[in-house]
Amino acid sequence: MNRPAPAMPFQLSPPPAGLCQDARFDESLIAMAAQNGPMACVWESGQGLVVPRTYQRFESFAAACAEFAGLGWPVSVRQSGGGIVPQGPGIVNLSLAYAAQGKPLDHSDEAYLLICRVIAGALQEHGIVSQPQAVEGSFCDGRYNLAVGQGASARKIAGTAQLWRRHTLASTRDTVQMVLVHALILAAVDADALTACANRFEQAVGNHKRYGSDRIASLDELCNTPGHAREAFTLALKDSLRRQLVSP
């Protein structure tokens, strides 16, 4: 996959200082994009779990949230779909928000492919080849995961989700559809620990889903600079993502 120019000029919003304590921070980009045009942000969140609203149907949901908050894994409920995902140091978030004319379903695939191209271009700078595909057995699986490897050996290295809202543009006063498309990128993580935590929460709420740690990969273990410090790789990946968004 060749390094693409961004499909539109994105303004980079500065991330919160340090680790963001609100895993739904990027939802604020929708209003910013309606005021200022397409917005993007590269950011990290504090440790926690994020689930879609559908998890609130489980009778044990409130009790499980209280238990995991006590273990240092507070649970946030997001507005987009999908499944359970972890957040925390070493997980890089990329969020894009912009206006689209027409129905959300007409632009959904395009939004996913855009964010996948941005990430794939950034990963190429580090010698990592990736492609969008489903990876059965990974948490929050979807056909617009980003993965490394092929076929049965593919491993997920990023997951994507999107949220649509109607909003009034500041420039024209027209009411349009705004999309927030988000990617969670496994930059420098402990795959076993993250997967075990997701599985424990699924068990706690009474969900039958279980995931395999061999279905995901930490990017710092795949980059073309062996021995690269994990923190240094995470910073370098953030820089690569920003370059993809602003380079001509």
Image (cartoon, rainbow, N blue to C red):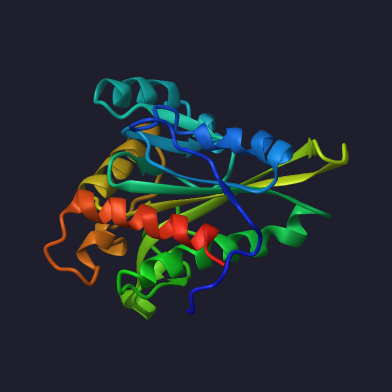
Q: Quadrant of the C terminus?
A: bottom right
Q: Residue furthest left?
A: 227
Classify 152 as above or below 122.
below
User: Is residue 192 shown to the viewer in this render?
Assistant: no
User: Residue 134 location in percent, x, y?
Assistant: 47, 67
143 lies left or right of 196? right
Q: Residue at x 33, y 47 (%)?
A: 91
Which residue is at the front of the view, 227 or 77? Answer: 227
Which residue is at the front of the view, 91 or 121? Answer: 121
Q: Residue furthest front?
A: 248
Q: Residue at x 58, y 42 (%)?
A: 80
Instruction: Give the quadrant of residue 6.
Output: bottom right
User: Residue 54 location in percent, x, y?
Assistant: 56, 37
Classify 61 as above or below 213.
above
198 lies left or right of 7? left
Q: Residue at x 24, y 68 (%)?
A: 222
User: Residue 223 location in percent, x, y?
Assistant: 24, 68
Instruction: Give the quadrant of residue 89.
Output: top left
User: Residue 118 location in percent, x, y?
Assistant: 50, 63
